[in-house]
Amino acid sequence: MTTAYEKLLEKNKSWANEQIKSDPDFFSRLSHIQTPEFLWIGCSDSRVPADKITGTQPGEIFVHRNIANLVVHTDINLLSVLEYAVEVLKVKHIIVCGHYGCGGIKAAMENHSLGIIDKWLRNIKDVYRIHQTEIDNKNNIEEKANRLTELNVREQIMNLAKTSIVQKSWKHDQRPLLHGWVYGLNDGVIKPVCEMGPGFEIDPIYKYDNL
């Protein structure tokens, strides 16, 4: 009997064979160059694969994923990806894409301890606290979670703008453009919620003057 993980390997072989049939030079070309225009910071949720929902091919999007698509200033993993994407790959766009129905968002709205992830979800709770009046005025829990999802994406875009990595690139290269999006699980459509680029004025306390 074929196990679940063996099926993945079989599907991989089938996919690789199909790629070669349709484009014999596909893997040769892919293995020698990586020039994506986009860095995608998305949720780890298995229902939100960046390439599938944007109709892109391997090599077109550089991807980082974590619970609830957060940009945390102490996350060395995220910052390493960001620095490489901006300074080496020279991406022109950074997309933070959340999604409605996010388990991380819902968990952050509750008061149950879930273990080590509590530390991570604290970042979302902070967004809720800042915008609590607006969120609590929504009619039901789904609307509240949807609005928090959108506000969380906005906050992560602002967190990107606060980094010296982005500010340096804005100053010297006039890139990247930052995009905040939310994906709908119910209809498969991406909703743009905010955009930010070179010249955007953030609070002076976050600006670096020696880049």
Image: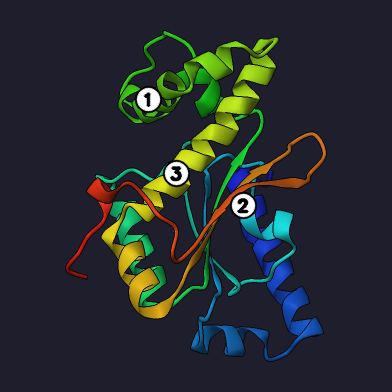
Amino acid type assigned to the residue bearing label 3 in the image: Gln
Residue 48 appears in the picture as rendered: yes
Identify the image quadrant of residue 184: top right
Identify the image quadrant of residue 195: bottom right
Q: Which residue is mark 1?
A: 126
Callout 3: few (<14), some (14-19), or many (20+) C-alpha neighbours within 10 Å? many
Q: Does 115 sit above or below residue 157?
A: above
Give the image location of residue 175, x and y in percent: 46, 72
Comparing labels 1 and 2, the label whose residue is closer to the camera:
1
For the residues labelled 1 and 2, the Cα–Cα distance comes to 42 Å
Amino acid type assigned to the residue bearing label 2 in the image: Glu
Helix or strand or loop: what does disc 1 sit on? Answer: helix
Amino acid type assigned to the residue bearing label 1 in the image: Asp
Residue 202 falls left or right of residue 93: left
For the residues labelled 3 and 1, the Cα–Cα distance comes to 12 Å
Helix or strand or loop: what does disc 3 sit on? Answer: helix
Q: Closest to the observer: 53 or 207?
A: 207
Q: Which residue is mark 3?
A: 156
Residue beneath the point at 47% across and 68% down: 176
Residue 89 appears in the picture as rendered: no
Callout 2: few (<14), some (14-19), or many (20+) C-alpha neighbours within 10 Å? few
Q: Residue furthest left?
A: 210
Q: Which residue is mark 2?
A: 6
For the residues labelled 3 and 2, the Cα–Cα distance comes to 38 Å
Number of marks drawn: 3
Q: Closest to the observer: 86 or 76?
A: 86
Give the image location of residue 200, x and y in percent: 44, 58
